[in-house]
Image: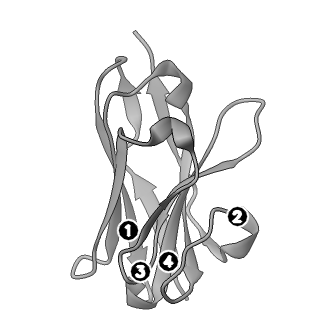
Amino acid sequence: QLQVVESGGGLVQPGGSLRLSCAASGVTLESYAIGWFRQAPGKEREGVLCISNSDGVTYYADSVKGRFTISRDNAKNTVYLQMNSLKPEDTAVYFCAAQWSFYYCSGYATEYDYWGQGTQVTVSS
């Protein structure tokens, strides 16, 4: 059974950076797409970006283009979300999720089967 666990969240000032990790256990991630989602208080969960098993990256939140990047390290069974130039509106709980998929990754939460518990990111001065 695949399990994913997020880490790396915290409090950061506007303009700062954080790197979130999504570590998998139980199954290798080589056949899975990984999506990052976020949910701010009072808002619906939104897709941010994702990476396919073949390292194709798709952005679903225009607001993070040019600031967020995603990468995977199959040797460590981990996917990373590098967040730069953070803004207060990036404040949310960030979730990673896994989808058994080849050459494709989705921005729809309903297409993901395995979810982490989330990690809080707060951008504030």
Q: Is residue 114 above or below residue 59?
A: below
Whole-angstrom CA distance, mark 1 to mark 3, is 7 Å
Whole-angstrom CA distance, mark 4 to mark 1, is 13 Å
Front position in the image: 69 or 8: 69
Three-letter residue code for mark 4:
Ala
The outermost residue toward the left is: 75
Front position in the image: 86 or 66: 66
Q: Secondary structure at mark 2?
A: loop
Task: Name the residue beneath numbered marker 2.
Answer: 108
Three-letter residue code for mark 2:
Tyr
| Residue at 44% across, 87% down | 26
Q: Is residue 88 above or below residue 98?
A: above
Q: Secondary structure at mark 3?
A: strand
Task: Name the residue beneath numbered marker 3.
Answer: 25
Residues tagged 2 and 1 counted as in contact (Cβ below 8 A): no
Three-letter residue code for mark 1:
Ala
Task: Name the residue beneath numbered marker 1.
Answer: 23
